[in-house]
Amino acid sequence: MTNAETFSSVVQRQLDAYNQHDAHAFSACFSETVQAWRHPLDAPFLKGRAELHDYYAHERFCHAGLRAHVRHRIELGNRVIDHEHVVGLGAPREVVAIYEQGDDGLIGRVWFFAPG
């Protein structure tokens, strides 16, 4: 993250890279020690930038129609909360993602919530 870049713009940059299926640009928005959770799991399903990169490169970006569109974004201190509409993984789905800024200004932790 540059001095002029806000955390919200880092989150937007990762969303843009996600929609372009650019695993390198996507993972560059995350801290080396990033952790990602899927609610309601107690443990992270991804730990570290390398694991995140490999997962998205091989499990998500292989789906040509995959796209996420932000329906609503909330900026709250060191967190950005996105309500996203995701297509390209079967039926369209709604997801809430909470991105938390790490010490390096990048995404340090992320939580994903889907309708129960």
Image: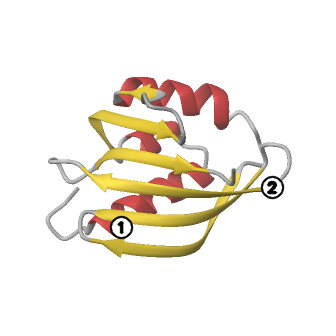
Q: Who's the residue at 46% across and 38% down the image? A: 37
On the rendered structure, is 24 left or right of 104? right
Q: Is residue 20 above or below residue 7?
A: above
On the rendered structure, is 57 left or right of 46? right
Q: Secondary structure at mark 2?
A: loop
How many residues crowd mark 1 within 10 Å: few (<14), some (14–19), many (20+)? some
Residue 102 image position (x, y, % from top left): 22, 48
Q: Amino acid at mark 1?
A: Ser
- The image's colouring method is secondary structure
Q: Who's the residue at 24% across and 63% down the image? A: 78
Q: Secondary structure at mark 1?
A: helix
Foreground of the two, 114 or 1: 114
Foreground of the two, 23 or 43: 43
Residue 52 image position (x, y, % from top left): 45, 31
Foreground of the two, 10 or 42: 42
Mark 1–mark 2 distance (CA, rounded to whole Å): 25 Å
Residue highlighted by disc 1? 9
Residue 38 image position (x, y, % from top left): 53, 39
Residue 106 image position (x, y, % from top left): 27, 50
Q: Who's the residue at 53% across and 48% down the image? A: 112
Toward the right, the furthest residue is 91
How many residues crowd mark 2 within 10 Å: few (<14), some (14–19), many (20+)? few
- Number of marks drawn: 2
Residue 32 falls in image quadrant: top left
On the rendered structure, is 34 left or right of 59? left
Q: Amino acid at mark 2?
A: Pro
Quarter of the figure that contains the N terminus = bottom left
Q: Which mark is residue 92?
A: 2
- Mark 1 or mark 2: name the one nearer the start of the chain: 1
On the rendered structure, is 116 left or right of 92? left
Residue 98 falls in image quadrant: bottom left
Q: Nearer the viewer, mark 1 or mark 2?
A: 2
